[in-house]
Amino acid sequence: MEARAGDRLLTHGRTVGQHDRIAEIVEVLGAGGTPPYRVRFEDGHEHLISPGPDSVIQHQGRKQAPKKNR
């Protein structure tokens, strides 16, 4: 899992009736974009988290480098 500040972290609900949670990644504390991450939820609450397999990174505003023709 690799992220940058500004990406979003989507954590799926684990039980029936539990909603997915979305947080903005504010700070990446691991080397090379790896966890742990400091995240901010919609209500303003910040938390330090190491996401599990029920989480997905949604990359925001990244552009891919153009491919060179040979």
Image: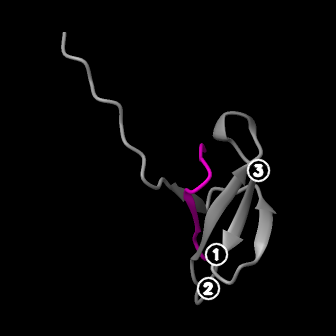
**Separation of disc 3 and disc 1 at Cα?**
20 Å
> For numbered disc 2, what is the local secondary structure?
loop
**Separation of disc 2 and disc 3 at Cα?**
23 Å
CB under 8 Å between discs 3 and 1: no
Question: Residue 34: x and y, percent?
Answer: 68, 42
Q: Quadrant of the C terminus?
A: top left
Rendered residue at 70%/64% (across/down) = 39
Query: What segment is highlighted magenta in the picture?
Result: 1-13
Residue 57 part of the magenta-drawn span: no
Give the labeled residue for mark 1: 14
Residue 18 is marked as: 2
**Separation of disc 1 and disc 2 at Cα?**
7 Å
What color scheme is it?
one colour
Residue 3 part of the magenta-drawn span: yes
> For numbered disc 1, what is the local secondary structure?
loop
Query: Furthest residue to the left?
Result: 70
Q: Left or right of 65: which side holds 37?
A: right
* Mark 1 crowdedness (10 Å alpha carbons): few <14, some 14-19, many ≥20: few
Between label 2 and label 3, give the one nearer the viewer.
3
Tell me the kind of residue under disc 3.
Answer: Pro
Q: Quadrant of the N terminus?
A: top right
Tell me the kind of residue under disc 1.
Answer: Arg
Give the labeled residue for mark 3: 36
CB under 8 Å between discs 1 and 2: yes
